[in-house]
Amino acid sequence: MDDQVRIFDTTLRDGEQSPGASMNREEKLRLAHKLADLGVDIIEVGFPAASPGDFEAVRAIAREVTGPVICGLARADHQDIVRCWEAIQGAPKPRLHVFIATSDIHLEHKLKLGRTEVLDRIAREVAHARSLCDDVQFSAEDASRTDPRFLSQAVAAALEAGASTINIPDTVGYALPHEFFDLITRLRQDTPGLDRAVISVHCHDDLGLAVANSLAGVRAGARQVEVCVNGIGERADNAALEEVVMAIATRRRDLGVDTKINKGEIYSTSRLVSTVTGIAVQPNKAVVGMNAFAHEAGIHVDGVLKQPLTYEIMTPAEIGIGQSSLVLGKHSGRAGLKNLLQEIGYQLGDEDFERLFGAFKVLADKKKEVFRDDLEALIADEILRIPHRWRLKYLNIVSGTVTVPTATVIIDDGYEDRQEFGSGVGPVDAVYNTIKKITGTNAQLLRFSIASVTGGLDAMGEVTVRLEENGYTVLGKASDPDILVASAKAYLNGLNRLDFLKRQAGLAPGNGAGGQGNSQSPPTAGVGRNDS
């Protein structure tokens, strides 16, 4: 049996379905290039039939990103498959991924189909996909809750129709590791021809078992694992790429397999995904959390100083965490900034670099030292975000123990500067009330949090907000040494994302306060969530 496990990364598709993690075309492109540097075998780049924005993002990645197989997702539906092929056909190595549910609970309540109808559809639509693309993958959604005999029939139908990769998903994270091992083992025994295909596993983390189930699948013979960077995804998330890869690397002798991942790129890829999506990595997250290689207890520190292997089963250097402190200041030039960017895994074009360098100099004048996290926060604000409809030009706040908090705000809407004055129960409330006047938004603030990006009294303050309007929920994120400025920027960042989504859906009027003023063509890139 092949001892190479293929890493199928679905951060740009299933990972993007994590609430608030939607990405636009440019963000997806940047991440796809980074995933190629990481060495993943297959990148599932999106669901082209979901929206025009997703179609354009998938097509752009197919044309521009080389190295990995570029995969698009389609339901077992004729039009879905055609749309998916139109998006990915420009890739040097395209793959069509066709799926349909097979569990009785999905057939009865979602698809309203009988088993015979599902088998007919699998045969018909997988054959249609195979007529367009030489590389076809079939997924039996909710496989872990499917009658094993029917699952074998479904897989056999897909193989007969031309699928060369068969994916067995634990869609709702229900399986236990021994059950998932038995399922893959039985499927291999009961399905003629499956030995000629690659078996894939796709596990969710609803019971915290996604990585364990994925490894159980590998032990049973699966040679492709579907993962997301940082484990992001629907509900409780997906199997985490970094955990699967490092488990295989650390326990290679026991598992008898390996991957082709460039492990030195893992940490910088994790940080980039966190920056783009606005979803922070929890401190105690395995492999890439800030505490993964931190030691405080005296006995641990003593052991690590004498021999790191006493408490570290892998080294920070393996995943790309450097040992030196990366610090820049106001006297640093372009060469120093470029060097740091390369060390933390960012490759910017000339225009983006010059914009970042200008923002860096402004920050360096305010702070004595600029750290790695400061720089990543700047990249999030200056480079990775969607085109802004509204930009903060001026902010003045009056607050204290004996005065009503008030704010004066000037916002550039792309055509003119708009100024308003407002008050609130506190300075942030005053700022947000004033911004509401200018933008005319009806968005509800669901979450507001402040964190220090770096240590020290001059630390960058990072503000994250979650906004909801018309069924759309987005994250807004910004950083600044002044937390009130960061609060205003984060709120506007979220409003820009909401405006972008509404424009794609044709719900937003033209530019201007309260929706008045000149119209503006909607951007082509999509950041809407795929719910399929």
Image (tube, rainbow, N blue to C red):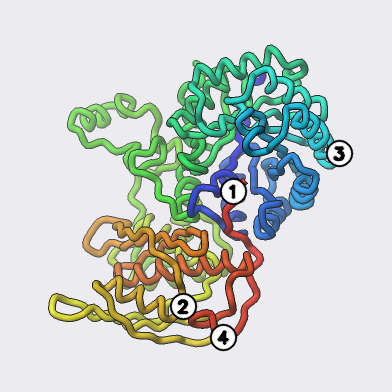
First of labels 3, 4 by sequence position: 3
Query: CA–CA distance between discs 2 and 4?
Result: 12 Å
Query: CA–CA distance between discs 3 and 4?
Result: 50 Å
Report the amino acid beneath label 4.
Gly
Would you place residue 432 above or below residue 42 in this image? below
Report x, y in % for residue 160: 82, 25
Residue under circle 2? 440
Camera-side mark, 2 or 3 = 2
Report x, y in % for residue 228: 53, 40
Residue under circle 4? 517
Query: CA–CA distance between discs 3 and 1?
Result: 28 Å
First of labels 2, 4 by sequence position: 2
Q: Residue at x 40, y 68 (%)?
A: 491
Report x, y in % for residue 350: 57, 67
Residue under circle 3? 131
Q: Which mark is residue 232?
A: none
The answer to the question of whether label 2 and label 4 lie on touching residues, with beta carbons closer than 8 A, is no
Q: Nearer the viewer, residue 454 or 197?
A: 197
User: Farthest top residue?
Assistant: 189
First of labels 4, 1 by sequence position: 4
Where disc 1 sits, the SS reads loop
- Position of the N terminus, as image quadrant, is top right
Report the amino acid beneath label 3.
Ser
Q: Residue at x 74, y 41 (%)?
A: 96
